Amino acid sequence: MSLPSGLLERLEKELGRGQDLVVLLDYDGTLTPIVPSPGAAILAGSARRTLAGLAASPRARLAILSGRALGDLKTRVGLRNVIYGGCHGLVIEGGRLRFRHPRARPAVMRDARRLLAAAAPAIPGAELEVKGLALSLHYRHVPPGRRREVRALVERVRRGVRGVTVVAGRDVFDFVPRVAWDKGRAARWIVARAALRPGPAVLYAGDDATDEAAFRALRGRGITVRVGGSPTAAEFRVPGVREVHALLRRIQRALE
């Protein structure tokens, strides 16, 4: 498999300067393939070993930034020396870093959860996932003819529940507290605090619409990689998860 030559040249240039490297990655669709059920997104052993090697490098800091709940994300990756960002970065933990957005409170989500829990079971294939600070309404298995009901339910929550905003992802709507925060702000927060030395090189890879905020936030500041074929603000693109794994192996070897 091949990686974009421009991406490899840029990476070689950045690492050749002897800088530290902060690597930020999405989970679903980036480290693991998109699967029918969120619970089936299992990280391959070979990918975990590569991530472990990156996390152990004295020149690298590894962060995984996902819409998943923080505890779920940590369990699925299962590595120490990694910075984990759950609920699109509303909560961040790893090493010495601890962050929880001060205005993101579970109580804000109660009305949204009540409404979604009452209405979602009536839509065939819809699945409600509770994540503490966030809720996810998955509709991958909803028949095309019934998806208008999903959109109508989302609009009911959007209009009827104060303090909650909707984030559209791949076959999912995430409901999060309405605060001035997204993956872009979370990525910059991590980069500013994660590196061992000032001025690190930065690489961010993700496959979802929610990653676009990070691509924009890191424009001119880091190497940004969109996974898949959707329109993007990222500088580079790779076709899929296999190429992400190949890129990470390349980085690991360069840091040895």
Image (cartoon, helix red, strand yellow):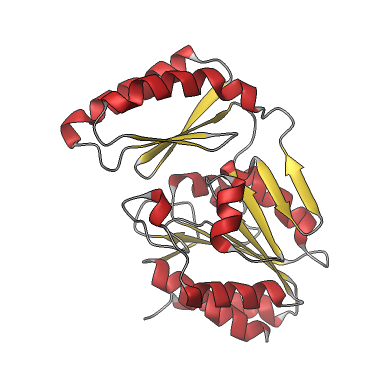
85 vs 31: above or below:
above
Q: How many marks?
A: 0
Give the left or right position of residue 174, taking residue 53 as reference: left
Of residues 200 and 92, the one drawn nearer to the viewer in this rendering? 92
Q: Position of residue 220 (x, y in %)?
A: 63, 57
Query: Looking at the image, which residue is at 76% across and 59% down?
Result: 194
Q: Position of residue 232 (x, y in %)?
A: 43, 52
Give the left or right position of residue 219, taking residue 189 as reference: left
Give the left or right position of residue 199, taking residue 142 as reference: right
99 vs 40: above or below:
above
Of residues 126 and 89, the one drawn nearer to the viewer in this rendering? 126
User: Can see residue 65?
Assistant: no
Q: Position of residue 74 (x, y in %)?
A: 61, 56
65 vs 253: above or below:
above
Query: Looking at the image, which residue is at 52% across and 26% down?
Result: 165
Quarter of the image that includes the N terminus: bottom left
Query: Looking at the image, which residue is at 74% across and 75% down?
Result: 59
